[in-house]
Image (cartoon, rainbow, N blue to C red):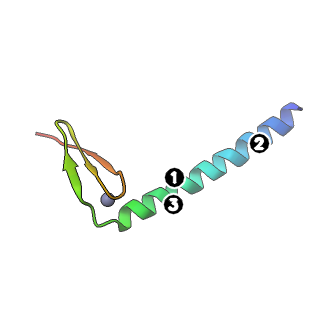
Amino acid sequence: MKVNDIQEKIHQLQDQLNYWENHLKDVQNDCNHDYQEDSFYKKCIRCQKIEAIYY
Ligand SMILES: [Zn+2]
């Protein structure tokens, strides 16, 4: 495999990663969150979104 081919592949994967991360954000933004609280964070049991808890 040539370096150019490898770089091209890396760019494709970065594009896909961006796409899926944005898709995940959209899903999590649409979620009617149902949080389960832990000591330092809370996690939505529906979309797995994690938010830190500050005291
Ligand atoms: Zn959620």
Residue kind at label 3, given as amino acid type: His
Q: Which residue is mark 1?
A: 21
Q: Is mark 1 within 8 Å of ligand 1?
A: no
Residue kind at label 1, given as amino acid type: Glu
**Marks 3 and 2, how far apart at CA:** 21 Å
Q: Quadrant of ligand 1?
A: bottom left
Residue contact at pointers 3 and 1, CB within 8 angstroms: yes
| Whole-percent x, y for residue 48 in the image | 35, 51
Q: Which residue is mark 3?
A: 23
Dot 3 falls on a residue whose secondary structure is helix
Quadrant where the C terminus is found in the figure: top left
First in sequence, mark 3 or 2: give its number. 2
Q: Nearer the viewer, residue 34 or 15?
A: 34
Dot 2 falls on a residue whose secondary structure is helix
Label at residue 9:
2
Residue found at x 85% / y 36% = 4
Using the image, determine if residue 19 lies above or below residue 13: below
Residue found at x 36% / y 57% = 47
Label at residue 30:
none
Q: Is 7 on the left or on the right of 17, as rendered?
A: right
